[in-house]
């Protein structure tokens, strides 16, 4: 007899009967429960006598599959245009992406660079480009670019890039990245429906390996393209199985010599627009469906290698140990303490312990610190304070600590003229900063005038299967993106 389990799902009021119906037969109780956290507007606890994997949690109340309950049905365009093709296309594209790289037990996505899921996503992108008569190119770094087939238009040298990425963090949400790519294609469809003539080439971009989930470096594709990541350094990056990017690319039949900066492409780009699900509650708190990014906090990933001596957990006296876990623990507590004090963010989300025995003192602990702060001086001070506290503990214990910055991103301020024009075009949309990194930040640092649009995320949860945006807000995002593209690319 399987253990009873409780599954918590947040659902809108009108979804509840559908949820109860879809649960009937599979669960023994459906309890409605109010929660104090105002972010959740309704929570239903489902007491089930089946293991959680029996249910597709995302299907019960989150993510793309809300359409099963009817709420992904697109609403009519509110601009007075008759066509709804872009809305149908949006839903179709979303449906097609939904199963790719999805873990059905959690509802989360595992879409890592050059994995089988990533190759399927690349094929999907190529299909969408072909369906719109666009000319697909690859910049050699794995970034996919879909150009207008009209050679005269494509060759003008003032292209407007629009897009995002399709890869994910481990067990990530459906929206981070794909929303920007799907919306880019749907915005092109909407511009066609509106009969807008584009005088500049609009190029849909799918950037490679934005999350850096496999090889550790965030925004590897856009960094390679802009030259801020050297090809040799990139090709030498290793994944958790010890495979280098060079080995992985070779196994996928890619040309290693093609991995390089592409100023020739970037010189033909006059602007980049990235739409992204918001990864906080800023827009929800302001009651706005769409907003415009002002800035990205400086942030970085730092690898901390703590070394000590493996020994017996039962026989080694506490004072005789060289246990690297303690300096790591000091670092975790310091990260929390100093980030709170500084109004910054610090996270240890990944740790590897060797040899990994319950009854053995570890010989080494390797952990990754993700640190972000409102300004660069605060970021440096934060990482120093965490390191200092950890070193204090490692001195006491006679253990070692090495800190290696793996990918550090400076503060980004997006092009103010573009930002203000976009906010005005969108009827005075809110302008807000973010602590999340994006390819838009990399291109902006490289000097490409860049604008980012955010789509409301009702709970603010991101990098999680519970990441969400309401269908109406997604379509509002598509309309906003089309408005901005028309402003940038139409006569
Ligand atoms: C990207 O999503 C990041 O900010 O980690
Ligand atoms: Mn992300
Ligand atoms: Mn993203």
Image: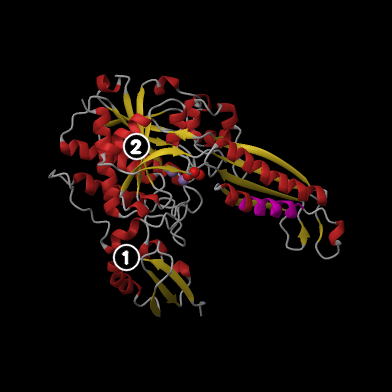
Q: Quadrant of residue 59?
A: bottom left
Q: Is residue 457 above or below residue 428?
A: below
Q: Is residue 159 left or right of residue 237?
A: left
The x, y position of residue 220, in whole percent, is 51, 35
| Element on which disc 1 rests | loop
| Element on which disc 2 rests | helix
Q: Quadrant of residue 62?
A: bottom left
Instruction: Count up the numbered dots.
Output: 2
The x, y position of residue 288, in whole percent, is 31, 50
Magenta stretch in the rendered image? 324-336
Sequence-first tag of 2 and 1: 1
The x, y position of residue 87, in whole percent, is 23, 48
Disc 1: which residue: 12
Magenta stretch secondary structure, dominant:
helix
- What residue is shown at x 46% (from left), y 62% (from top)? 105
C-alpha span from label 2 to label 1: 36 Å
Disc 2: which residue: 126
Ligand 3 within 8 Å of disc 2? The answer is: no
Check the picture and name the quadrant holding the C terminus.
top left
Q: Is residue 248 above or below residue 60?
A: above
């Amino acid at each position: 007899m399987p253990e009873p389990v409780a599954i918590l799902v947040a659902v809108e009021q009108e979804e509840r009967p559908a949820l109860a119906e879809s649960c009937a037969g599979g669960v023994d109780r459906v309890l409605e429960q109010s929660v104090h956290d105002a972010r959740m507007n309704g929570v239903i606890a489902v007491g089930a006598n089946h293991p959680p994997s029996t249910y597709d949690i995302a299907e019960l109340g989150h993510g793309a599959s809300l359409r099963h309950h009817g709420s992904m049905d697109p609403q009519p365009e509110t601009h007075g245009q008759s066509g709804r093709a872009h809305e149908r296309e949006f839903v179709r594209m979303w449906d097609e992406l939904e199963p790719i790289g999805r873990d059905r037990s959690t509802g989360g996505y595992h879409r890592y660079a050059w994995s089988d899921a990533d190759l399927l996503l690349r094929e999907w992108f190529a299909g969408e480009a072909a369906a719109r008569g666009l000319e697909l190119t690859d910049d050699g770094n794995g970034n996919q670019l879909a150009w207008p087939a009209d050679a005269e238009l494509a060759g003008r040298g003032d292209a407007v890039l629009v897009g995002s990425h399709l890869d994910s963090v481990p067990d990530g949400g459906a929206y981070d990245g794909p929303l920007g790519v799907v919306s880019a294609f749907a915005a092109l469809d909407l511009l066609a429906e509106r009969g807008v003539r584009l005088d500049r080439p609009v190029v849909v971009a799918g950037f490679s390996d934005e999350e850096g989930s496999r090889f550790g470096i965030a925004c590897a594709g856009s960094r390679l393209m802009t030259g801020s990541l050297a090809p040799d350094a990139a090709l030498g990056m290793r994944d958790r199985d010890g495979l280098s990017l060079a080995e992985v690319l070779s196994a996928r039949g890619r040309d290693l010599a093609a991995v390089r900066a592409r100023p020739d492409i970037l010189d033909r780009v006059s602007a980049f627009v990235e739409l992204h699900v918001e990864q906080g509650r800023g827009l929800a708190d302001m009651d706005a469906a769409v907003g415009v990014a002002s800035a990205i906090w400086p942030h970085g990933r730092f690898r901390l290698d703590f070394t000590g001596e493996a020994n017996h957990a039962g026989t080694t006296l506490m004072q005789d140990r060289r246990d690297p876990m303690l300096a790591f623990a000091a670092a975790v507590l310091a990260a929390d303490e100093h980030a709170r004090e500084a109004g910054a963010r610090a996270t240890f989300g990944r740790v590897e312990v060797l040899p990994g025995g319950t009854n053995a003192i570890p010989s080494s602990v390797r952990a990754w610190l993700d640190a972000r702060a409102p300004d660069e001086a605060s970021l440096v001070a934060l990482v120093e304070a965490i390191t200092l506290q950890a070193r204090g503990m490692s001195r006491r214990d006679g253990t070692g600590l090495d800190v290696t910055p793996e990918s550090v991103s400076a503060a980004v301020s997006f092009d103010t003229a573009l930002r203000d024009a976009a906010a005005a075009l969108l009827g005075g949309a809110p302008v807000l900063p973010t602590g999340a990194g994006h390819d838009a930040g990399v291109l902006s640092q490289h000097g490409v005038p860049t604008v980012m649009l955010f789509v409301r995320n009702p709970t603010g949860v991101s990098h999680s299967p519970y990441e969400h945006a309401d269908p109406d807000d997604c379509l509002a995002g598509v309309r906003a993106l089309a408005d901005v593209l028309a402003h940038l690319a139409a006569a």
